[in-house]
Amino acid sequence: MSDAAASHLMQTYARLPVAFERGNGSWVVDTNGKRYLDALTGLAVTGLGHAHPRVIAAIAAQAGRVLHTSNLYEVPNQARLADKLCAVSGMDRVFFGNSGAEANEAAIKIARLHGHARGVKRPTVVVTDESFHGRTLATLTATGNRKVQAGFDPLMPGFVRAPFNDITAIEKIAENEDDIVAILVEPVQGESGINISSDDYLPRLRAICDANNWLLMLDEVQTGNGRTGTFFAYQQSGIMPDVVTTAKGLGNGVPIGACLARGAAAELMQPGNHGSTFGGNPLVCAAAIAVIDTIEDDNLCNRATELGARILNGLRVGLKGNNNIREVRGKGLMLAIEFTNDCTHLTRAALEAGMLINVTHGNVVRLLPPLTMLDAEADELVSRLVGLINRA
């Protein structure tokens, strides 16, 4: 992109100086023909890798039939996708939007409807420090990062914050606050550096919600669609949420978000309460159906577990003894290398070395490889990244 063309874009992104023109599997190629091993997948989006044949076929076939009709009419692909999502999740109903932020907006609206149905005048949702739920005004308020909130005051009322993975703090809120109607939490915090909740965190949140008639709402925008080793991360905890949101990997690159609910929470939204012009259109639903079918048919949830363990172990062995490393951690294919100091320079250094990675929270290298990555590619990623870090 020329400087003249770039100057007409709002300066909302600090973009790296590279543009990609094609990709295949775990690799992308820039406009100069250089290949890069993609360990970021568009921020956990292209979980099936680039140019997956089943997704290509689904999009091409649907594009030749109809792209959009609106939600004034029945959308058969949308109904089929909702059936598949409910089958893999155990939920009852789905609302489709275009992004994770929209899915979380729907969840927040469900929480407020739940509160008003209980006679709560100012329904309040518990959210956690260091969380990330989106950049709309409601989801920005729910997000636990003052840096991304700066400049957008006044933020919305209706949220109270607790430290992540701290049950005692939630119990104190339950004792002292009368207006709480729901908890919104990520099972693994992605944007703040792959912070993984303890094994008993979700079960104990479930118990608190049951005791207080709160909704347990899980943001699985990043953790969903097989990335942590099950289709949704909560399926490893033995509990069911009342509401779960997802997006990112559901469309493998086409914009889609979904808010799923069960039980009474699934019946709160009625005609006129919510909507989306483009949400759940025939094209994106066709792509998402292909994604779910591929995850199931190719056993990619188990593959995420195996591949994540392979990469994690390789990184731990290769970085052992490096005093700049505080911790190497992961859950499935959400992996992090936490440094003792700032490591933001590694994003560009990795780009020059032919790798796509991300540094988040200033000192955490975040890796989100595709679920379809080959063992040899995983080993190459580890070798390249360990060499880069140890030479730095």
Image (spheres, rainbow, N blue to C red):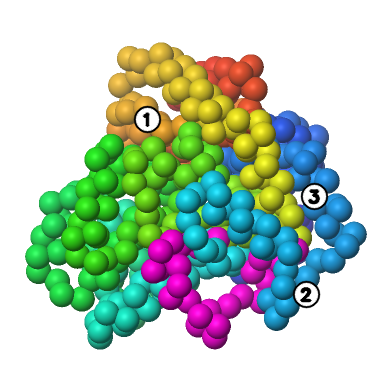
The spot of residue 25 in percent (x, y) is 72, 33
Name above or below for residue 186 compared with residue 370: below
Seen at 76% across and 35% down, the residue is 24
Q: Nearer the viewer, residue 252 or 113?
A: 113
Q: Is residue 71 left or right of residue 330?
A: right
> Could you tell me the amino acid type at mark 1?
Arg
Residue receiving disc 2: 69
Quadrant occupied by the C terminus:
top left
Seen at 64% across and 17% down, the residue is 376
Residue 278 part of the magenta-drawn span: yes
Crowding at dot 2, Cα within 10 Å, few <14 / some 14-19 / many 20+, comes out as few
> Could you tell me the amino acid type at mark 3?
Ala
SS state under label 1: strand
Q: In the rendered structure, which disc, 1 or 2, sits on the residue that comes first in sequence? A: 2
Crowding at dot 3, Cα within 10 Å, few <14 / some 14-19 / many 20+, comes out as some
Q: Which mark is residue 58?
A: 3
Q: In the rendered structure, which disc, 3 or 2, sits on the residue that comes first in sequence? A: 3
Residue receiving disc 1: 329
Q: Which mark is residue 86?
A: none
The spot of residue 390 in percent (x, y) is 44, 19
Name above or below for residue 54 compared with residue 273: above
> Could you tell me the amino acid type at mark 2?
Thr
Question: Which one is in front in this view, the residue at disc 1 or the one at disc 2?
Answer: 2
SS state under label 3: helix
Q: Nearer the viewer, residue 154 or 10?
A: 154
Q: In the rendered structure, which disc, 3 or 1, sits on the residue that comes first in sequence? A: 3
Q: Is residue 91 left or right of residue 85?
A: left
Residue 269 part of the magenta-drawn span: yes
Q: Is residue 65 left or right of residue 148?
A: right
Please, which residue is most extreme toward the right here? 64
Magenta-drawn segment: 258-282
Residue 62 quadrant? bottom right
